[in-house]
């Protein structure tokens, strides 16, 4: 590949993407180990987080869109969570067939236990790091996410 075609920022973004791919695999594996005692996987925990953090109950399609994932994958995970009694589906007053995903009491208990287990883990990961720099990294990642979303939206038009 011709690295000369990349700007300095483009080259840095390319290196960041490779690091993020590697980090993602490790995060998923570590997350699976962390939440396994609560009957969760990283994927289930991620979907439950989207449900918990949403200001209002949402249908699967909107949860998937908010998470940047495909609807079918999120639908499968919601089906698993439903079978485990961790979420339930409620009627949607705005749409006859797109039911709303809502966490059950059992789901809230599992999700809150996962968050309690996460606290010492993320504290360990952040040990010795500058919180200001971490927040700056988060802002940069958010800008990249927004640019990808805009690019995808433009391609869909």
Image (cartoon, grey):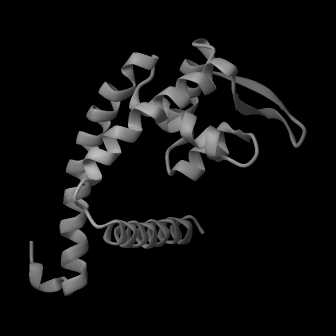
The residue sitting at the right extreme is 93
Residue 156: image quadrant is bottom right
Q: Position of residue 62 (x, y in %)?
A: 66, 47
Q: Is residue 147 above or below residue 73?
A: below
Quarter of the image where the C terminus is located: bottom right
Q: Nearer the viewer, residue 131 or 26?
A: 131
On screen, residue 156 versus residue 41, left or right, reads: right
Residue at the (58%, 30%) spot, across then down: 75
Residue 99: image quadrant is top right
Q: Is residue 79 above or below residue 95?
A: above
Residue 91: image quadrant is top right
On screen, residue 53 versus residue 73, left or right, reads: right
Q: Position of residue 138 (x, y in %)?
A: 40, 66
Q: Position of residue 141 (x, y in %)?
A: 39, 67
Quarter of the image where the N terminus is located: bottom left
Q: How many marks?
A: 0
Residue at the (76%, 45%) spot, across then down: 56
Q: Nearer the viewer, residue 25 or 36?
A: 36
On screen, residue 37 versus residue 57, left or right, reads: left
Residue at the (40%, 40%) spot, across then down: 119
Q: Position of residue 149 (x, y in %)?
A: 51, 65
Residue at the (45%, 16%) spot, across then down: 39
């Amino acid at each position: 590949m011709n690295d000369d075609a990349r700007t300095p920022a483009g080259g840095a973004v390319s290196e960041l993407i490779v690091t993020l791919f590697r980090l993602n695999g490790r995060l998923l594996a570590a997350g699976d180990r962390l939440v396994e005692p609560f009957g969760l996987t990283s994927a289930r925990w991620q979907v439950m987080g989207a449900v918990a953090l949403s200001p209002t109950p949402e249908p699967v399609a909107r949860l998937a869109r908010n998470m940047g994932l495909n609807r079918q994958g999120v639908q499968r995970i919601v089906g698993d969570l439903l079978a485990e009694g961790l979420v339930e589906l409620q009627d949607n007053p705005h749409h006859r067939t797109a039911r709303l995903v809502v966490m059950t009491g059992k789901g809230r208990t599992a999700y809150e236990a996962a968050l309690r287990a996460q606290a010492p883990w993320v504290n360990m990961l952040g040990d010795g790091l500058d919180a200001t720099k971490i927040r700056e990294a988060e802002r940069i990642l958010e800008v990249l996410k927004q640019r990808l979303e805009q690019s995808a939206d433009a391609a869909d038009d």
